[in-house]
Structure formats: structure tokens, C-alpha cells
Amino acid sequence: MARQPLVLLIPADRRTGARTRAGLEGYGYDVLMAGTLEEAHDLLRTHQRVSVLVVDVAPEKIAEGMALAKAARQADPSIHVIYTCGAPYKLPEREKVRDAPCLRTPYHPHQLVGVIGQISSGHCFDEHEMRAA
């Protein structure tokens, strides 16, 4: 049986993070959770097995979240990035890393599991699919 990806989760808040982490672990994923973007940078440096980065890009931290995703992709071009955001249409496309879908918040962990499965299999989402997710 193939090993599930190690997911690094940077949620909007602790409650969302705890619910999402428990949901992902229930589906068999290994999950690291960072409370801050700085902690996420440290975890990316120390855990080479991270293959999925899920970063919430709240309106007040869009630039920082986008910068984290870019840094992660530069350090490991194979890392999958998923943005979460309450208003995905506000994310500037030119700032997003390539092939990184955005899941609208609030979401249920099973929706995130579906997105992880799709990107891990090489499926590229279009804007309409992500709104439906």
C-alpha cells in the first residue's frame, strides 16, 4: 500500500486546524500543523517528506501566504500547494504558484481530501470545479 502524503496545514485558526487535522488523519494522512507562517517555514525545512502544503490566505495575509507557497515550491518543485480562502476571486492569479487550486472556506475535511487526491493524481482544476468542491 502506498504511503499517504505528509500534509503541512496552515489553517486560519486553531479550531479549523484541529477539525481539519482530525479529518485528514481519519482518512489516513500524516499531518503537521503550523500556527504561524514562520513555523510553517521551519517545518518545511526540517520535514523533507512534506508533499502537500495547505495554506490559508486570509485577506490580511495574502502576500505572506503567497510568499510561503512560492518559497516551498522553489525549495521543492514537486510540492503540491492548495490555497484556502474565503474569497478565492481576490487571490491574484499572477501571484499564485502554478497548478495550485484554491478551496473556498469554510470547507469540510473530506473536500480537502478530494482535492489532495486529485492534485496527487495530476488532475488540474479549473475555476468552476473548485467552486463546486
Image (cartoon, rainbow, N blue to C red):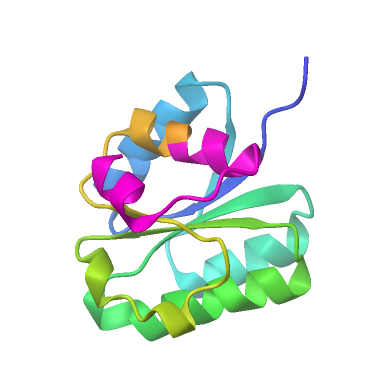
Please state the extent of the stretch shown in magenta in the rendering.
115-133
Q: Is residue 113 above or below residue 97?
A: above
Q: From the image, which quarter does the C terminus lie in?
A: top left
Please identify the residue farthest to the top as the structure is shown: 1
Out of 39 and 96, give the one closest to the viewer: 96
Please indicate whether residue 63 sits to the left or right of residue 2 in the image: left
Q: Can residue 27 be seen from the camera position used here?
A: yes
Q: Position of residue 121 (x, y in %)?
A: 65, 37
Is residue 121 on the magenta stretch? yes
Q: Is residue 4 left or right of residue 27?
A: right
Q: Is residue 89 above or below residue 130?
A: below
Residue 65: % across, % down: 44, 74
Q: Residue at x 25, y 41 (%)?
A: 132
- Magenta residues: mostly which secondary structure? helix
Residue visible at 72% across and 76% down in the picture:
74
Whether residue 14 is visible to the viewer of this picture, yes or no, is: no
Q: Is residue 44 above or below residue 61?
A: above
Instruction: Please name the residue shown 48% across and 75% down the image.
Output: 96
